[in-house]
Image (spheres, coloured by chain):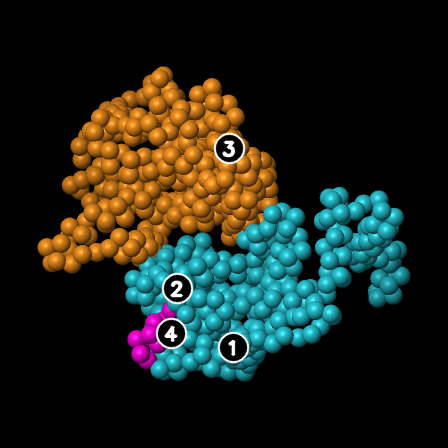
Amino acid sequence: MFYREAGQYKTSYAADMAVFPLRQDRIGLGIIIAAAYALAFTKNDFLLQAVMIPFLIFSLAAIGLNLLTGYAGLLSLGTGGFMGVGAYACYKLMTAFPEVNVLVWILTSGFFAAGIGVLFGLPSLRIKGFYLAVATLAAQFFLQWAFNRVPWLVNYNVSGAIEAPLRTLFGVPIVGPNATPEVRYLVVLTLVIFLTWIASNIVRGRVGREWMAIRDMDIAAELMGIKLLNTKLLAFAASSYYCGVAGAMLVFLWYGGAEYTVFDINQSFFTLFMIIIGGLGSLIGSFFGAALIFIMPIGLGMLLPALLAPFGLSIGSETIEHLRFLIVGALIIFFLIVEPHGLARLWQIGKQKLRVWPFPY
Amino acid sequence: MASEAAAIRKPGLDPRAMTWLLALLGLAALVAVLTLATRTGVIGRGNLIYDVLVDPFVLMVQSPDLLVQTLWEGLVSGVLYALIALGFVLIFKASGVFNFAQGIMVVFAALTLVGLHEKGVPAFLALILAIGVMFVLAFAVERIVLKPLVNQPDIILFMATFGLTYFLIGLGELIFGGNPKQMISRELYLPQGSTDLQMFGGLVRLQHIDIAAAVIASLMIAALAVFFSKTRIGRALRAVADSHKAALSVGISLDQIWVIVWFTAGIVALVTGIMWGARSDVSFALQIIALKALPVLILGGFTSIPGAIVGGLIIGVGEKVGEFYWGPLLGGGIETWLAYMIALLFLLYRPQGLFGERIIERV
């Protein structure tokens, strides 16, 4: 409704196959990214620390799980464990090589998570559907036990928890107690944009198509010549890489420290809900789902007391937490009934309707 | 013709029997080698092979009373896992839905019972009211969740039960509060205390509530078996489990059957909740234990009631014995993941479980 798509002619194959072929879409994307960067300068620490940074981190984890479950069709409940592997790997690398830039280690820790992901993804050739979910549950519980019981992972410290030491980039502290929310938010935003760009290219390329072929009918994919084991393991590796990087960012660029309970089964479930509600097999759906599942309770926490205050009723924070479970559960059922493809599909439908507005079709 | 077939017989044994025979021989050879090595002192305590393969068995033989105690506790927790798995199997057989919410139904049922009793309702009336609440829940689930999602793929229904789980968690916490509660065992005339048996030179302690749990579980399983095979509704449930379309064409109302099956699973959940709650408190941590039912189902097969029981017992015993004898080697606490590892290994060799139907992939 804001613009017509006609009149933009492509003169090369590359331009024709571009992800955002319309100039207006590219401008829109640029505006969104610019606005995201501009948020850092609004001096609203609460918004950055409690809303935007975790939203971006969980979106990255949701992208990771979406690569595995949405694009490759391999249901996984081990997200929490893989995030933990990334976090603890980053911790060990950071403390073992303190002179190397921490961003290098955050991006490298994903590879360790990818390795563990491949290991626990090996059964996927024999096991399908939600039997595979049980195999990944084994990964989740085993990894959580390992985080708790292997003292080497926490450098033998007494408390069993890991803490973010001070690290700088170009002289500005980005990890540790002195790092301000603005700086951390800018780092997280840049990393997430970069990794989302890579994910977008992966899913639109040959590998992404192989994953989707496996998801749709793996027997036919195998007959077509797609090597099932390699492709499934690659899905596990890529997904665990993203979850590992998200886990490392969770601990070092948001919480500032963590213990093994952070990466429990609830984390796996919440990431799964994010991609179910956001839309399986859609990158933008990961962002939508993370926004809904994560920001909604915060919004509720601010909205409900404001609504009830005029009536003199006060509402405790545990009630908000209970309501959060209630509403998340109800929303999942609601979305599965109304739109099984999630918010991403609703977004697509909305855009389509707006294209031809005011006509219905 | 027959004589020709009989004449052309391949030499040697059937290959499956050959594999089993070789495996047994290999196991016997391993045991012989280990015994020899231990007797001659080649390997001893501190050596990894000894610690993993020999020491636990030596310990088992040296203190058989500990072994019996561990086996008993394994059997008891196995019975409770089997009860939870039973609820899953009931719903999966009849509606093809893997009901992830079974765990929270256990907690919810137990909480309703205790909550009603706390409000002052006498114990047995509270029991009947709790059964009524489970019926209302079954009806609501069928109307709101199952009916709109009738022809959707299984994974969507599975995720819908995820949503149901979190909804019930939120609802239960809102209504009853998040604090752990005491099960009303005395008011329900459940036995308390324990008996000590002198056995094998040591003491084996059997809790009365555990014996009661085993007895009640067996009674319930027997009742369900009779229900399924002898009553009209039980036969209808089996018909729906076989094929929805065929059941519809015979005139069985799918809606009614689903309400009945979820109600039955709700009753099973209530009994499970009472038994679990009597051994430890009733709290929301119980629903994580329900995740343990997944390995049980994998072992036993998703559609088999005897499979759920056998699988539950195997997992229960395997977990306890593994934790007690092999746990200290790894630092303890391996109960959290041992069941899943057992299930994983099982899945690699027999995906349909011990009693399940063979998975046939159709393209």
Tell me the element at label 1: loop
Chain B on-screen colour = cyan
Closer to the N terminus: mark 2 or mark 1? 2
A134 or B130: nearer the viewer: B130
Left or right side of B310 for B165: left
Secondary structure mostly seen in the magenta stretch: helix
Residue that numbered label 1 is attached to: B192
Q: Name the residue under label 2.
A: B180
Disc 4 is placed on an element classified as helix
Query: Is residue B119 covered in magenta?
Result: yes
Which numbered disc flags the more N-terminal residue, 4 or 2? 4
Looking at the rendering, in which quadrant would you find the N terminus of chain B?
bottom right
Where on the picture, by quarter, is residue A356?
top left
> Which residue corresponds to mark 3?
A89
Label 1 crowd bin: few (<14), some (14–19), many (20+), radius 10 Å: some
Q: How far apart are marks 2 and 1 (CA)?
A: 20 Å
- The residue depicted at 36 percent of the width and 66 percent of the height is B141
Measuring 57% from the left and 55% from the top, which residue is drawn there? Answer: B335
Taking the image as drawn, is residue B135 in sight? no
Q: Nearer the viewer, mark 2 or mark 3?
A: 2
